[in-house]
Image: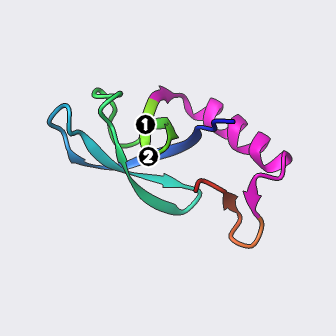
Amino acid sequence: MCLAVPGLIVEITEQSPPFATGVVEFSGVRRGVSLACVPDAQPGDYVLVHAGVAITRIDEAEAERTLRTLEELGLEDEEAGRAVVE
């Protein structure tokens, strides 16, 4: 099964396509992510990330619903209080 996890873009580190990259926060954990598929994304945008690649932008309400669902399904790291993304 493939799973894309919502995260918040906190920083753009490279804007030049096809190498666009940024820092995305997942419930307090920050990771470097390719933004090549969402070149118009900006800090403050929520994106769905699969295998280190942001595949689409989503709104904040959808991100929150998805994170709640992951928690309800037990796909959250209880000790750290965050969704398992690795």
Q: Position of residue 7 (x, y in %)?
A: 52, 45
Q: Is residue 50 above or below residue 79?
A: above
32 inside magenta stretch: no
Relative to the observer, which residue lies in front, 79 or 18?
18
Say left or right for 75 vs 13: right
The mark closer to the camera, 1 or 2, is 2
Task: Please tell me whether residue 57 is drawn above or below residue 76 in the rendered image.
Answer: above
How many numbered discs, if any? 2
Dots 1, 2 in contact, CB < 8 A? no
Q: Amino acid at mark 2?
A: Gly
Rendered image: mark on residue 79 = none
Q: Which residues are magenta?
A: 56-77
Q: Residue at x 34, y 32 (%)?
A: 41
- Residue in view at x 28 percent, y 45 percent: 21
Residue in view at x 29 percent, y 26 percent: 40
Residue 86: quadrant of the picture? bottom right
Instruction: Please tell me whether mark 2 sits on a helix, a strand or a loop.
Output: loop
| Residue located 64% across and 32% down the image | 61
Is the image coloured rainbow, by chain, by secondary structure, or in one colour?
rainbow
- 57 lies left or right of 62: left
Q: Residue at label 2?
A: 52
Q: Measured from the top left, where is residue 83 in percent x and y?
A: 67, 54
Quick one: 23 or 86, which is closer to the camera?
86
Quarter of the image for residue 3 reads top right
Q: Local crowd at mark 2 within 10 Å, few (<14), some, or many (≥20)? A: some
- Look at mark 1 in the image and give the residue it sits on: 54
Question: Disc 1 and disc 2: Cα gap in Å?
Answer: 7 Å
Residue 63, image x, y percentages: 61, 36
Instruction: Categorize mark 1 by other alpha carbons within 10 Å: few (<14), some (14-19), many (20+).
Output: many
Camera sees residue 3: yes
